[in-house]
Structures are given as C-alpha cells and as structure tokens.
Amino acid sequence: MQKILTLTIKVISLFTVLWGFIGIHQPLSAQPPKHEVRAAWVTAVYGLDWPSTRATTPANIRKQKAELIEILDKLKAANFNTVLFQTRTRGDVLYRSDIEPFNAILTGKSGGDPGYDPLTFAVEECHKRGMECHAWMVAIPLGGRKHVTSLGKQSVTHRKPQICVPYKREYFLNPGHPETKVYLMSLVREVVERYDVDGVHFDYLRYPERAFRFPDRYDYRKYGNGRSLEQWRRDNLTEILRNIYYGVKKLKPWVKVSTCPVGKYRDTSRYSSKGWNAFHTVFQDVQGWLGEGIQDQVYPMMYFKGNAFYPFALDWQEQSNGRHVVPGLGVYFLHPKEGDWEVEEIERQINFIRRNGLAGEAHYRVKFVTDNTKGVYDLLQSHYYASPALQPPMTWADTIPPTAPTELSVERIADGYTRLRWQAATDNDTLNRPTYVIYASDKTPVDTTDPRNIVEQRIRGTEYIYAPIYPWEEHRYFAVTAQDRYGNESNPSTGVLQSSHKDVSK
C-alpha cells in the first residue's frame, strides 16, 4: 500500500510539472487580456527603489519628485495599471501623519518634513496616468534598536509600549494584544480618510518566521481560551485583518484591502511546501481570510521557479473564493547578483497565470523592471503588456455598472488633435464618481472588448483630447464608457469623426 501511495504522489508531481508547461509556452503575439492587474512594488525602505535624493532644498524636492515621475512614466509606457507605493515602513511613514513620524529616507532625518506630502503626490501622479495607487503598509515589524531609538518619542515603542515586544534584536507590534488592531486601524483610517488611495496593501502581517519563543506567553495565557498557541496566533492575525477590512469598507467601500503573504499557503495535494509556508511558519491563515471574504486581493510572494511556483499558484486560485489572486513575481532574481534567472522564467509564469485565470501579476521590485534587467521591461512593453488593461471588477462588492455617458461629440480641433466631449454618467453609489475609458478604432462599431482599442482610462472629466503621436494611430471611430471604482463598466457611447470634420454622435 505504501509503495502504491508513493507511486501515486510521484505521478501527481510529474503531472504538475507537465501541467506547468502546458500553456505556459504560448506565442508572444497572443492577445493580452482586457482585464488584468499589472502591479509593481515601489520600495522606499533604504531608498531601494525611491528616493535617492534627500528633500532638503527646493531644488532637491523637485528632484525627488522627478525621480518618482520617471518611475511612473516608465510604468505607464509599459501599460502597468497598479502601483503599490510604500507608505509605512517600520514604525515610520511617507505621508503627513498625526501618529507616526516621516521616514528618514525622505530628508536624511527621522521625522524630517520633506516640504510636500509624498503620498498625496504619488496618488495624484498615478491617477494622472490612469493607474491605481495602493498604500503599501508594513504591519508588524518595527525595526532594530538603532532604528527605534532614532524615532525618539515619536516611536510607537515609546508612545504605546504595552503593544510592542522585543524579539531577536528587533521590535514588533504584538498581534496578541487587543490594542494592536486598534492602533493599526488608526493608521489605516488616516490614509483612507485623507487620501484618494485605491487600496491599502499589508506587508508583514505575520509573525517572525518560526517564532517559537516570541514573547507573547502572557497574552496567550490571558486570551488563549483553550486554543493551541499556533491557532491563537493565526486567530490574532485574522482578527487584525478583519477589523481593518470592515473598518475600511465603512469609510470607502471601493478601497481594496489586500495582503502579500508568504507565497506558499501550505502543502498542496500536488506538491510539498518542504516545511516552509504561510500557515505553519508565520501563522497566516490566508485561505481562511479569502474564504471569510476579508480580502479583496491577495499578492502571494511567489518568488520561486518550477514546481515551487506552478502548483502553489493553482492552489491560491482554487481557494480564492472569487477574490483576485495576483502572484508576486521575483523579477529581482533576474539580476546576476541575485539569482541570475533567465527572463524566460518570468514569461512562463505570466503565461501560466493567464492560462489558469488568475487576476494578474505584481513585480518585485520596480527597479528591476524599469532598469530592464535581462530585457524584462522590453518584453513586457512590446509583448505581454502591449495593450492596456482595465482592473478586474470586484463583483463581490458591486455588480451594477454606471449608466452610459451620453451625447458624445467628436471634433477635429487642429491637425492631429481630436476633442471628445460627452455628458456625465451616474452610478448607483453616489459617493463613487465614475471615470471614463476611451476607445478608438478604424472600424465601426468600435469593439470595446478588444484592449488594443483602449486609448486611455480613468479619465475624470467629460472631455478628452486625443493627440496620437504617430499618423497610423489616428482613428475615425470612438467610444466612451463609464467605469466605477469597483471595476464595473457601462455600455459605450459612440461617435465618428467625419472627413469633413463635422460631428456625428449617437
């Protein structure tokens, strides 16, 4: 019997390998999907991605902003649509907070005011380019002793010592203390109420790896209520996330709540996690979060190759409960000093993600994309992201699209410039003002299911100037749809630019 079982496991593993390569080799010319999350993490800690300039003078403030603009311009040119902008690192932040100090990376000094609000700037610049901006917040770690000391009286370890614990030369928020979830929600409330973010994205919502001696025994005895230590810890993280999820939805129900958990949930029927996974190693019950519906998106950090990637990606999707699963791809491993991967590894993973219906992918980190490591930027721009993509809709939150915009007019206002105007759409959620997607084509009716016809998205007004760079990008037929912040899209309003330059609309 044991031999039969062993043989069965081997066959399943072989099947997984073969399955991983079925459909992951597809032609580069294959049409990208219309709906897909294309995200990149912009890492501020240690200035890894941004910024390299300190905002100490007006000229340096402009230079610091220009660095971020350059990153966003490159992402826009490659049809990315989501920026995970680091907003909280370890007990310090990159926005004007009443709770925690500015990160030293902005000015060279902890708490130093950079002369502008980086999160406001990031959100505005992302939205100008039709991209979502998610506030990426590190949850539990607070940094080492030197870092905590540098924050002085503004450190949470000084202001709220009862919810902080030292462990292995670092400080952490204590997930087992009931006030920890309240403290984290206070930070989230600042961000969601004050800023027009599209999501809040939690990193390190977990215990340190294999933290068997984490100093929470007192809290466990007090609050464990007969559960095992392991289950109590998982429940603590779940309660923090539950509190944040429902807190955000009360403020702005369209704001997405996501996490980036350890990339393997636990062993799957197809393949072993080899003793390292979210459930046992860091006490994250992520599939429980998805099943309960307290996640809109999950970005598992799947910085692996081969059978360490494909069976676990399938497992995430199969347990997604309809939520968006967006695997994090380890593009940093392309660098010769990291893993020296071949770029074909990233190709295979994107092909696999698309073939198996996952919501998209995220790239860690953005610098390895914009630096075109191993040609990955060129590959994305020219092939995998050759056409724009809209955000997948959050059908569990809202399924009612806005009304269609009306009275579309199309007018040639100068050589190569065409002005589109329309009457605004309305939405069932009065707080959720629709934005608009512009389509253009040489054929009528404009096929709004084809992402190659998307000209621009997230237009906030009711007017758009179409100014194609190349003559072959000029089009005669246009369509405009309205899209709410849940991703629901209206029927199109169509218009045609006649050769006589007269407007015709319908």
Image: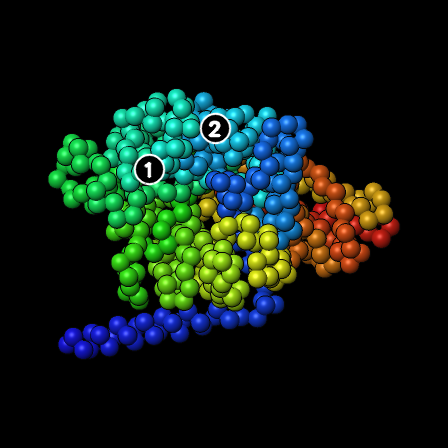
Lower sequence index among marks 2 and 1: 2
Q: Is residue 310 left or right of 389 when viewed as pictured?
A: left
Q: Please name whichever residue, 67 or 24, is drawn nearer the observer in this view of the structure.
A: 67
Let me know if residue 57 appears in the view.
yes
Identify the residue under disc 1: 170
Identify the residue under disc 2: 110
Look at label 1 and name its amino acid. Glu
- Outermost residue to the left: 226
Q: Position of residue 230 (x, y in %)?
A: 20, 45
Q: Which residue lies at the image location 42% right of the left edge and 28% below the top edge?
A: 150
Does residue 334 sit above or below 46 in this rendering? below
Q: Is residue 232 left or right of 172 when viewed as pictured?
A: left
Look at label 2 and name its amino acid. Ser
Q: Position of residue 71 (x, y in %)?
A: 61, 45
Task: Give the image quarter of residue 427.
Answer: top right
Q: Which residue lies at the image location 39% right of the left edge and 62% below the top edge?
A: 309
- Outermost residue to the right: 500
Does residue 137 sit above or below 498 in this rendering? above
Could you tell me if the residues under marks 2 and 1 are in contact, i.e. CB atoms within 8 Å? no
Q: Which residue lies at the image location 49% right of the left edge and 55% below the top edge?
A: 332
Q: Residues within 10 Å of mark 2 (few under 14, many from 20)?
A: some
Q: Which residue lies at the image location 46% right of the left edge and 61% below the top edge?
A: 339
Q: Secondary structure at mark 2?
A: loop
Q: Please name whichever residue, 115 or 408, is drawn nearer the observer in this view of the structure.
A: 115
Task: Give the image quarter of residue 20.
Answer: bottom left
Q: Position of residue 277 (x, y in %)?
A: 30, 54
Q: Please name whichever residue, 203 or 420, is drawn nearer the observer in this view of the structure.
A: 203
